[in-house]
Image: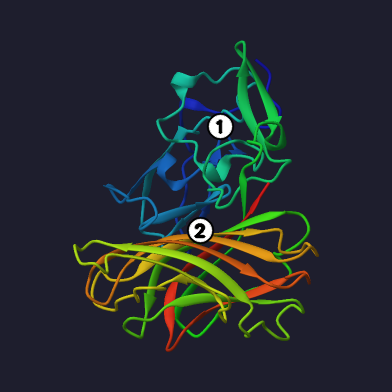
Amino acid sequence: MAYIGVQPRLGNFQACDAISTSATDTFNLLVGGVAIFPQTAQHCLVSLNGILQAPISSYTISGSTIVFASALTSSDSIDFITILGDTLDLGHPSDDTVKTASLQANAVTGAKLNTDVISAQTALTDEPADTDEFLVSDAGVLKRIDYSLIKASGSMVKLQSQTASSASAVTFTSTYLTTTYKVYQLHCTAIDLSSDGGNLGIQTSTDNGSSYETGSNYKNIRQHSRDDTSSDAIKTGHGTGDDRVRIVGTGYGVGTNNNEGGMSIITIFDPLGTGKGKFFKCYGCHFDENNKLVQQDHTFALDQSAAVNNFKIIPASGTFSGTFTLYGVA
């Protein structure tokens, strides 16, 4: 077969022409008077003064010359230099010639994959966008489909989540309270108060937080039950006015000992509407300051017609911790 360039010499041992030594370290390599180019020093057997020389440490190859580690003299004798041939460079395999069995296990890593290859190496940390695509098998044929076509209707869309630690307030702004949704849900988990027997509530704003409704305009109906047998185990009540929507701790305050604390889910109805009143439905539970389990069912109504586009969560006193996540109900 023909070759472009020098044909590789495989197992073709060749003896170099005799070399007369002199006071130098570099000598030309010839075979039949023609320069020869060994691939590396390891491809040569070199005997000097009856001793076989070690490649690299005793000599190196540079093109068609051999370079000894130190200069020789005219009394030295290069007994022989034998070229062992060259390593065959196969180049690139032809298309469709590499079989699966020829690949080493785990040889192909993520670094060698294109960014458009589905490898599951990157985690999606939030709800997919409507244009994000999923793979489905349609009667055995793999196809892709947009998330917008398969997501559930009437689902809740996560808008913002905030984690408070010894905070005095957590605020949700007009960025998240918009006319996109008529109904919102606020999930409050791992609530912990610094003041024993305290409570946590919401105050609303119609000017995106420049001011908040702090007057007695939050009407309410409340029901609480506690896990004891006293006559005080169940409480009901109502109010013509409160200064906040009570999230947790009304009736029986929230305890601060180990494992005491609480959670609550608040549904907010049409806060951006301009009709009469803004309505809030609160379900929650907590351990009170006596480590009694308390459940609560509250209904609050803000007696104003202006659109609410901001609200903050505040404790009655001290600070609080917890995770607060706002959802829009699609």
Which residue lies at the image location 32% right of the left edge and 50% below the top edge?
53
- Determine the secondary structure under disc 1: loop
Query: Residue under circle 1?
Result: 89
Type of residue at label 2? Thr
Q: From the top left corner, tell me how far across and down residue 293 is, in percent.
A: 27, 63
Counting residues from the N terminus, which is met first, the one under dot 1 or under dot 2?
2
Q: Nearer the viewer, mark 1 or mark 2?
A: 1
- Name the residue located 71 percent from the left edge and 31 percent from the top edge: 149
What coloring was used for the rendering? rainbow
Asked whether 217 or 62 is in front, the reply is 217
Could you tell me which residue is drawn at 59 percent across and 39 percent down?
Answer: 113
**Amino acid found under the numbered disc labelled 1:** Asp
Task: Examine the rendered structure and indicate whether residue 193 appears above or below residue 162.
Answer: below
Q: Is residue 272 left or right of residue 316?
A: right
Q: Which residue is mark 2?
A: 26
Image coordinates of residue 303 in percent, x first then y, are: 69, 72
Q: Quadrant of the N terminus?
A: top right
Q: Position of residue 300 (x, y in %)?
A: 57, 66
